[in-house]
Amino acid sequence: MPFRYSVEFRRQVVDRMLAGEAVQQLAADLSVSDATLYKWRRQALVDAGESPGLKSYEADRLAQARRRIKHLEDELKLVRAASALFNEIEVISPKGSTRLSER
């Protein structure tokens, strides 16, 4: 599982980058990958409307909707499988006799 930084930490680092500090220097000082810092800066610019792209709060809703759709599709598969199983079973009348008929 990837390491997750706090929102406050990310905000402080992005503010320092936007103030003009070099990404490589910040990466060395904070022990954070420079690729991660570039990604944070790019997303901050998108969220501020200075760069085109999907805002972070929109991406969260989209990811949540995709997870929900996947869950519902999996549930539908189970229901279809159960339905097919019950359609193949011979129905036995509950009022049928269990005694052998005498001759």
Image (spheres, grey):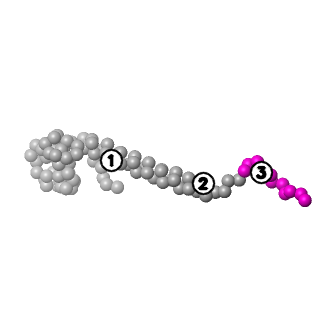
Q: Can you identify the residue that label 2 sits on?
A: 86
Q: Which mark identifies residue 96?
A: 3
Q: Is there a contact, CB below 8 Å, between mark 1 and mark 3?
A: no
Report the side of 88 relative to 10 (left or right): right
Residue at 44% over, 48% down: 72
In which quadrant is the N terminus drawn?
bottom left
Secondary-structure class at tag 2: helix
Residue 12 visible in this rendered orientation of the protein: no
The image shows residue 100 at horizontal and vertical percentages of 84, 57
- Report how far apart the C-alphas of labels 1 and 3 lie in the structure: 54 Å
Amino acid type at mark 2: Phe
The image shows residue 42 at horizontal and vertical percentages of 17, 48
For the stretch drawn in magenta, what is the main secondary structure? loop
Q: Is residue 95 magenta?
A: yes
Q: Residue furthest front?
A: 103
Closer to the N terminus: mark 2 or mark 1? 1
Residue at 48% over, 54% down: 77
Report the side of 90 relative to 42 (left or right): right
Q: Residue furthest right?
A: 103
